[in-house]
């Protein structure tokens, strides 16, 4: 087991959490790794904590400072370009990891891939443990072609750097939803990947994070549309086979249902109808064969989580019978 790993940690306003993050990264049992910390013009005391680690462990921690606030995606990619490591991992600054986090992923990456019967992987994916004020709960990830698309987080994964660079995979210039674009670009590039049963990434629910602060006023459906628009603009989707195109289309609906249900509830019917109108026009313009997609239904595809299947299925069947607007009006009142 060998190969240098660079762990990339952008940070902004995480003075309360970053100490535990850095402590966990400092204790890794893998011998050949470093950590690039990217200060995204954080106005709090995070920088002082980071500088203590950099001064004490200069062979392990390196600090990069953005000249302006660039957002998490661009901060991550600036660090990818600044390293020559074989492997890349991303860790959010308010989370922490187990001692064997890096070594577990590298071992999986360099073992034989069950999918392709090839040695080595471009990407390794794991589950995670949610830490809510010390209460820990494990979340598994399905081993499915849909996993790359429907598990759109940059963390809990290891990437071969050459794969990212060669295929022009990045986070776009968006400050929200950038992981969706990154996952679409990764899926398009057909990585050799492996899903492992591992839960050594500890995700902490930070009430001040971008995701936690989202609600119907943020227009998440517009963010989703923008990510898919950018994907089509930057990648030749005509090169995808029908199954890949249908999987991307299914992912689009899954994200839009999430935008309307999770972030759209309480918006009231007037605002909700504008959101639904935007989505309907986008479907008409870019996904005219949506209702013929073989993945669409109530309990399929089987490799997708039940929550997503139910959401997409409800969208499909209410739309089929002309009841989708009524359903979303109801959600807007909850």
Image: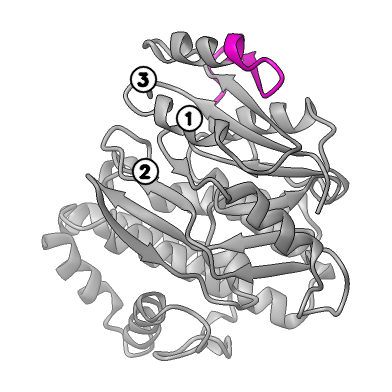
Residue at the (38%, 84%) spot, across then down? 313
Choose between 45 and 321: the one closer to the eye: 45
Callout 1 crowding tier (Cα within 10 Å): few <14, some 14–19, many ≥20: some
Callout 3 crowding tier (Cα within 10 Å): few <14, some 14–19, many ≥20: some
- Residue 250: percent from the left, percent from the top? 54, 75
Residue at the (37%, 64%) spot, across then down? 138
Mark 2 / mark 3, whichever is N-terminal: 3
Mark 1 / mark 2, whichever is N-terminal: 1
Residue at the (86%, 46%) spot, across then down? 162
The N terminus: image quadrant: bottom right
Secondary structure found at label 1: helix
Disc ID at residue 211? 2
Mark 1 / mark 3, whichever is N-terminal: 3
Closer to viewer: mark 2 or mark 3: 3
Is residue 87 among the parts visible in the rendering? yes
Secondary structure found at label 2: loop
Secondary structure found at label 3: loop
Specify start and end residues of the magenta stretch as a single range.
Answer: 54-71
Closer to viewer: mark 1 or mark 3: 1
Disc ID at residue 23? 1
The answer for how far apart the CA atoms under marks 2 and 3 are is 18 Å
Q: Is residue 271 left or right of residue 77?
A: left
Disc ID at residue 169? none
- Residue 113: percent from the left, percent from the top? 79, 74
Residue occupied by mark 3:
15
């Amino acid at each position: 087991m060998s190969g240098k790993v660079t762990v990339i940690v952008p940070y902004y306003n995480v003075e309360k959490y970053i100490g535990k993050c850095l402590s966990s990264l400092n204790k890794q049992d893998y011998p050949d790794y470093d950590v690039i910390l990217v200060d995204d013009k954080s106005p709090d005391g995070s920088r002082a904590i980071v500088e203590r680690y950099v001064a004490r462990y200069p062979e392990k921690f390196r600090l990069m400072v953005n000249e302006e606030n660039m957002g998490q995606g661009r901060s991550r990619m600036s660090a990818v370009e600044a390293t020559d490591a074989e492997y890349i991992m991303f860790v959010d600054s308010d989370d922490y990891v187990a001692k064997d986090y890096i070594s577990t992923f590298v071992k999986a990456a360099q073992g034989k891939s069950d999918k392709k019967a090839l040695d080595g992987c471009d990407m390794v994916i794991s589950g995670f443990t949610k830490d809510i004020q010390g209460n820990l709960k494990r979340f598994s990830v399905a081993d499915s072609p849909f996993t790359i698309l429907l598990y759109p987080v940059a963390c809990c994964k290891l990437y071969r750097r050459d794969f990212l660079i060669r295929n022009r995979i990045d986070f776009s210039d968006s400050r929200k939803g950038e992981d969706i674009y990154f996952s679409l670009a990764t899926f398009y590039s057909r990585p050799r990947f492996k899903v492992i049963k591992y839960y050594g990434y500890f995700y902490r629910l930070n009430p001040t994070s971008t995701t936690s602060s989202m609600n119907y006023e943020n227009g998440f459906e517009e963010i989703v549309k923008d990510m898919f628009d950018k994907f089509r603009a930057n990648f030749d989707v005509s090169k995808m086979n029908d199954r890949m195109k249908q999987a991307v289309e299914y992912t689009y609906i899954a994200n839009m249902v999430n935008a309307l249900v999770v972030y759209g509830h309480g918006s009231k019917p007037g605002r909700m109808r504008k959101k639904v109108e935007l989505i309907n026009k986008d479907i008409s313009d870019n996904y005219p064969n949506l209702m013929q997609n073989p993945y669409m239904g109530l309990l399929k595809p089987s490799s997708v989580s039940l929550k997503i299947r139910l959401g997409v299925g409800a969208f499909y069947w209410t739309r089929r019978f002309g009841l989708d607007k009524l359903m979303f009006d109801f959600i807007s009142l909850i």
